[in-house]
Amino acid sequence: MKTPRLRLAPINTGMYHNGVPTLENIDFFAARAGCGIGMCMVGNIATTSVTVPNASTGIMSDNLSWGSLAEAIRKAGSISGIQLSATLPGYRGQRSFVALDTETAMRQYKVLFDQMSEYDWQTLGDKFIQSIELCWRHGFEHVQLHAAHGYAFSLILDPKINPEKHGWKALISILKLLASSNQHGTSLRVSWHTGLPYDDKRQARILEVWRPFIGKIELDLSNGYYNLDKRHIYPPHQNGGATFLNNAVSLADEFPEASLVVAGNMWNPYKLLETIPSNLNISIGRALIADPNYLLHQRNDKTSLMLCDDCGKCHFFSKGAKSIECPLWPN
Ligand SMILES: Cc1cc2nc3c(=O)[nH]c(=O)nc-3n(C[C@H](O)[C@H](O)[C@H](O)COP(=O)(O)O)c2cc1C
């Protein structure tokens, strides 16, 4: 399968009813597919109703609307991608952007993590395996495992939360299934930086788990934990363009046989593609939420303006809304 250089970053729209994509959700992705975007990634789809971050999360099932969503993206001209995720049972997402106290937030993650037995991890892993197969049956061409942002599989990779590598076997069995497909694209999304002092140890774990699958599973570099400091996930615009590019370029150079993806204020994608390694791809979130034709404008006029002004309304959970809102894309 072709490796798209420019993608819609995984986006959870919140436009799900009883876990099923609504027509509004299908329209959201169809409006962005094509338009210069090689792959559209439907974000944060849970595999069970007890591992959702909030009530408006999609839950993978045999409901035919999932096939309609994949088809709408394909027909509009992008590869249809989907990201599968799990929160730990009992998890509560924090609405504020920055935790009052990092130690307390980390302790809360650890308390939930320690309640998971090996059997629980195996059961969750089995659920992922069923869901990946469902995604393929529905026609999704690329499946991503969400192991970033403090979700369940990112905590397996965290040596402070999980010094003893609990759940490792379940994680590997998911990656083996993803790597076994020659017909589908696959990726692993991780949080490279969280801002915590032991980040280098987490990064070593990420490389340990991913290295055997290089060439089969892309590494999608995100950052941050949702309940610690969301500014690592969605860098404020005032931090400037291509916020996290440098470490992504270093990794792409270190692993030339791998495919990697980077997100975070990637505002001049066509200019950047001329300079970054050919195995590093770009994904874009907020600029494409505000303006589905952002890439067309950029391609035609590399100095064209980005409409998103980082007003924050799209962060629907933090704002107490049910689904994405964007004053610049009112439909
Ligand atoms: C409204 C919204 C929803 C998002 N949903 C997800 C998600 O479901 N999964 C995920 O990994 N990242 C999610 N992200 C993070 C984006 O994928 C992306 O990494 C981040 O916004 C940085 O890219 P940007 O600067 O181009 O917006 C979301 C971002 C926004 C703004």
Image (cartoon, grey):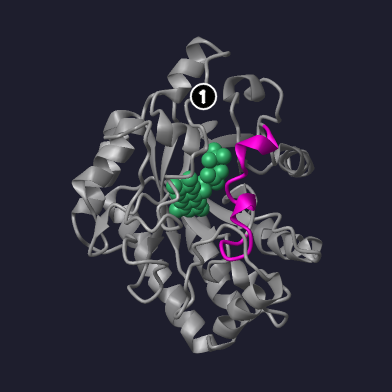
> On the rendered image, what quadrant is the C terminus found in?
top left
Q: Residue at x 44, y 29 (%)?
A: 37
Seen from the viewer's position, the closer of residues 236 and 175 is 236
Q: Is residue 299 left or right of residue 221?
A: left
- Residue for badge 1: 306
Seen from the viewer's position, the closer of residues 77 and 305 is 305
Asked if 154 appears above or below 11 in the picture, the reply is below
Asked if 34 appears above or below 195 in the picture, the reply is above
Badge 1 crowding class, 10 Å Cα cut-off, few under 14, some 14 to 19, many 20 or more, is some
Asked if 301 appears above or below 139 in the picture, the reply is above
Q: Secondary structure at mark 1?
A: loop
Q: Is residue 323 left or right of residue 278?
A: left
Q: Residue at x 42, y 45 (%)?
A: 314
Task: Give how far across and how far down residue 199 sits, in percent.
Answer: 77, 62
Q: Residue at x 35, y 44 (%)?
A: 325
Seen from the viewer's position, the closer of residues 92 and 170 is 92
Q: Is residue 210 left or right of residue 199?
A: left
Magenta span covers which residues? 225-240
Dominant secondary structure (helix, strand or loop) of the stretch shown in magenta? loop
Q: Is residue 13 left or right of residue 250?
A: left
Task: Give how far across and how far down residue 138 sits, in percent.
Answer: 27, 52
Task: Indicate the quadrant where residue 99 lies.
Answer: bottom right
Task: Give how far across and how far down residue 235 sits, in percent.
Answer: 62, 44
Task: Give how far across and how far down residue 74 sits, in percent.
Answer: 31, 36
Residue 4 shows in this picture: no
> Which amino acid lies under the numbered mark 1 shown in the image of this protein?
Met
Residue 294 shows in this picture: yes
Task: Indicate the quadrant where residue 241 lies.
Answer: top right
